[in-house]
Image (tube, coloured by chain):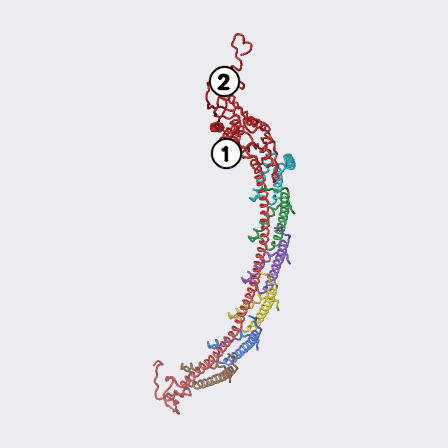
Chain colours: A red, B cyan, C green, D purple, E yellow, F blue, G brown
Amino acid sequence: MTQESSENRKIYSLLEVSLGIRNAVAEAFPSHLWIKAEIAKLNYYPKSGHCYPDLVEKQNGIVEAQIRANIWSGQFMQINQKFRAVTGEPLKDGLKILFLARIGYHEKYGMALNIVDIEPSFTLGEMAREKLATIEKLKKEGVFEENKKRPFPLLPKRIAVISVETSKGFSDFVNVIQTNSWGYEFSIHLFPALLQGEGAIRSIGQQLREIENRMEEFDVVAIIRGGGGDVGLNAYDNYSLSKAVAVFPLPVITGIGHSTNETVVQMVAFANKITPTEAAHFLIQQFHNFSVRLKTAVEKINRASTKVFDEEKQKFSHLLRFFEVHTKNLLSREAVELNLIGKNLGRNVSYSIQEADNRLKTLSAGLLQKPKQTLKDQQVQLRNITRMLGIQVRQELNNSTNKLESLQGKLELLKPENVLKRGYSITYYNNKPVTDASVLHQGQTLHTKLHRGSVEVLVEKVNKQTKDE
Amino acid sequence: MNKISYKEAMEKLEEIVSGLESDEIPVDELAAKVKEASRLIRICKSVLYETEEEVNKVLKEMQEEKPLEE
Amino acid sequence: MNKISYKEAMEKLEEIVSGLESDEIPVDELAAKVKEASRLIRICKSVLYETEEEVNKVLKEMQEEKPLEE
Amino acid sequence: MNKISYKEAMEKLEEIVSGLESDEIPVDELAAKVKEASRLIRICKSVLYETEEEVNKVLKEMQEEKPLEE
Amino acid sequence: MNKISYKEAMEKLEEIVSGLESDEIPVDELAAKVKEASRLIRICKSVLYETEEEVNKVLKEMQEEKPLEE
Amino acid sequence: MNKISYKEAMEKLEEIVSGLESDEIPVDELAAKVKEASRLIRICKSVLYETEEEVNKVLKEMQEEKPLEE
Amino acid sequence: MNKISYKEAMEKLEEIVSGLESDEIPVDELAAKVKEASRLIRICKSVLYETEEEVNKVLKEMQEEKPLEE
């Protein structure tokens, strides 16, 4: 419809066409319609209070339809308030909404949807659906817990903060950290970023990549958002941002606001600390923990070394006591033994002397008795000999006397006188006794001696006889 | 490098402490061990209380004195 | 005199103690043994005392530095 | 006089006592033996006494030494 | 007179006494033997007495000596 | 007269008595023998008497000596 | 008269008596022999008597001597 083709054709004025379109549209869409679309850009003008959202419909991220809309200031306040009350988000870029609108065409301003009402529960459902999808996808990819599994540094000393320098949240965070009364020294490096709305996803993502490039310089990342109230948080349910946080090589701490409904970023972050102050305290707490370990170590060293000293000293006093007791025991035992030996010695010597004395006494006693006995025996023997001598001598004398008397007796008998007395006589011839008749002759005178007196005898006859007669 | 240093320092410190607690450290070595512990504690404290540059200085000094790795 | 270590000194002491306990030490050697024990105890005490001094110094230094707080 | 050790003196003493007990010592030598025993006992006592003195001295010294602070 | 030992004296004495007991000593020698025995007894007694005196003295001295504490 | 010992005297005496017992001594010598015996007896008695005197004296002396204390 | 001993006298006497008993002596000598025998008897008797006297005297003397104490 350019100017050059105006000769052969019916030429409409722009207004005519525009009015025609307006009528056609009014005819085609006589009443309000419930439409769902995504707010590409809210285009809220606070001064006028009017809002001119750009609405789109995307498929696989590609814009398939787009239209302008307007919410007049009279309605916007009410709608926005209601929306916010239900979804926890203000109307903002990127939201999917279900709205009641009149399709209108304005000659001057073109096609526009005049939004008169928005159904917040739809957006809520959409947001929830999107959030769920993000969670499921992250889980499916196995990265949901990844950041939580990052080793947390003993001391999160070097903090990369993603925040807005001028925000209350950031200043709260820095304030808590820097004015900690324990003197912990942190080093904070701010990586400024948008923290709300659609822009936050890209902005935060960018800064995360920047931090990752300088990873060695930092211990931990803190995403700090503050002052913005509860609104504008659904960017944190965004898949790409959530994933970026989830797979981030350093632990990420979030302090992005009070939300009854945790965002995915908060879920996957290493630690979700709601407020910047809490995040700061969390970090300080790590210092405390470290400090406690140190303090415990010092105390333990103190205690253990004191214990060692006490025990060793105790050992010394035990040793001292041991030596005291033991040597005393040993010495007194020896002393007892010595005294015992002394006593035994005395007793044994006395015994030996006593024994010797007894032996001597026995010998003395023997000496006292035996010689006397010997002498007595000798006396007895001597007396016996004397007696024997007397007896023997007398015996001898008696024997001799007896023998003599016996001889004398015999002699008496043989005396001639005694023979004659018994009648025998002796006849002599020539003074010789006659014993043989044969020597005699008759007539001889013989002299015969009798016991008393004698006679003269004449031989008358001789009888010769043999001797044997 | 810093991270490793103070972490190692803490581990060594706690090793020494548990050695002390289990009476494994002879009296002869006690002073040396406690000194070593003190050195390690200083490293750890420096991380707590000093600025990054100061910490690096302390660690550098310490490592020049005696390396942590034994 | 401090050439001997605390541990060695203690071992020698314990040797003497067990000798005394088992009555293996003749009276003649008792005084010498007790003297030796005294010497060893003195050595040990001196080592312990020095160690304690040193340890206390280190611990004090440690506490005089910015103390750890909770 | 102290050339002889306590042990030797004790052995000699026991020899004398057992000699006495088994009546092996002739009366002629008795006094000499008892004198000898007395001398040995005196030696032993003196050794014991000296040992005790010395041990006590050592122990006292040990106790008087500046005790380690406890 | 004390040239002869107690032992010799005792032996001689025992010889005499056993001679006496077995009536081997003729009466002629009896008085001499008894005298000899008496002399020997006196010698022995004197030795014993002196020994006892001496022993008692030694023992008394021993007991008077400061006893070791027990 | 005392040239002859008790023993000889006794032997002679016994000879005489046994001579008497076996009638070997003629009456002529009897008186002389008896006289001789009497003399011998007297000698013996005298020896015994003197011996007894002496022995008694010795024994008395022995008993009068101070006995050993018991 | 005492020139002849008791023994000789006895022998002669016994000779005479036995001669008489064996009738070898003629009667005319008989008287002489008897006379001789009587003389011999008288001699013997006298010897016996004297001997007895003497022996008695000796024995009596012996008994009169102070007996040994018993």
> Residue, x 53% and y 14% (percent of image)?
A14
10 Å crowding of disc 2: few (<14), some (14-19), many (20+): some
Disc 1 chain ID: A
Whether D11 is drawn above or below B11: the answer is below
10 Å crowding of disc 1: few (<14), some (14-19), many (20+): few
Question: Picture coordinates of residue A5 (x, y %)?
Answer: 54, 9
Q: What element carries label 2?
A: helix
Front tag of 1 and 2: 2
Q: Mark 2 points at which residue?
A: A22
Label located before the other in sequence (1 or 2): 2
Closer to the camera, E9 or G14?
E9
Q: In which quarter of the image is the N terminus of chain E?
A: bottom right
- The answer for how far apart the CA atoms under marks 1 and 2 are is 46 Å
| Marks 1,2: beta carbons within 8 A | no
Q: Label 1 amino acid?
A: Thr
Closer to the camera, E19 or A439?
E19
Q: Label 2 amino acid?
A: Arg
Q: What element carries label 1?
A: loop
Closer to the camera, E24 or A212?
A212
Residues beneath discs 1 and 2 located on the same chain: yes
Q: Which residue reaches farthest top?
A: A8
Question: Picture coordinates of residue A118 (x, y %)?
Answer: 48, 27
Whether E46 is drawn above or below A427: the answer is above
Q: Which mark is residue A260?
A: 1
Disc 2 chain ID: A
Whether A201 is drawn above or below A339: the answer is above
Closer to the camera, A456 or F68?
F68
Question: Picture coordinates of residue A165 (x, y %)?
Answer: 60, 31
Whether A244 is drawn above or below F15: the answer is above
Question: Picture coordinates of residue A42 (x, y %)?
Answer: 53, 25
Say whether residue F63 is left or right of residue G21. Answer: right
Q: Quadrant of the C terminus of chain E?
A: bottom right
